[in-house]
Image: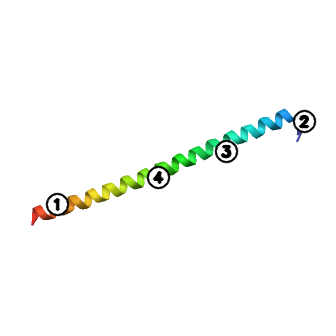
Amino acid sequence: MIRYNLPEDEDNSKENINDYKRKINHLSEMLDMKESISKLREKHVERLEHQLKDMSREKFIFVN
């Protein structure tokens, strides 16, 4: 197996560092977005549960 290592120069390592920073920022934004979506989903589920309880009460009252 032949390996070739690029020479370590400052420009190359700076580009790599900047690339990693961009990737980390992107992943961080995606994580924040996922958390926001989870919170919205949770609120929506709670609202639907309350609506369902209200509907069942109304139906119970109407039937009785």
Which residue extends farthest bottom? 64
| Mark in the foreground, 2 or 3 | 3
From the viewer's perspective, is residue 58 above or below residue 27?
below
Label located before the other in sequence (4 or 1): 4
Q: Position of residue 49 (x, y in %)?
A: 31, 59
Relative to 9, is 48 on the left or the right?
A: left
User: Amino acid under label 3?
Assistant: Ile
| Residue wearing tag 3 | 24
> Do labels 2 and 3 touch, CB within 8 Å?
no
Task: Label 2, secondary structure: give it.
Answer: loop
Label located before the other in sequence (4 or 2): 2
Is the residue marked by circle 1 packed among few (<14), some (14-19), or many (20+) residues within 10 Å? few
Which residue: 62% across, 41% down?
A: 26
User: Amino acid under label 2?
Assistant: Pro
Relative to 34, is 63 on the left or the right?
A: left
Q: Position of residue 41 (x, y in %)?
A: 41, 52
Q: CA distance from mark 2 to mark 1?
A: 75 Å
Q: Which picture quadrant has residue 58?
A: bottom left
Is the residue marked by circle 3 packed among few (<14), some (14-19), or many (20+) residues within 10 Å? few
Q: CA distance from mark 2 to mark 3?
A: 25 Å
| Residue wearing tag 2 | 7
Q: CA distance from mark 1 to mark 3?
A: 51 Å
Relative to 58, is 40 on the left or the right?
A: right
| Residue wearing tag 1 | 58
User: Amino acid under label 1?
Assistant: Glu
User: Amino acid under label 4?
Assistant: Ser
Which residue: 77% across, 40% down?
A: 17
Label located before the other in sequence (2 or 1): 2
Q: Nearer the viewer, residue 58 or 3?
A: 58
Q: Which picture quadrant has residue 27?
A: top right
Is the residue marked by circle 2 packed among few (<14), some (14-19), or many (20+) residues within 10 Å? few
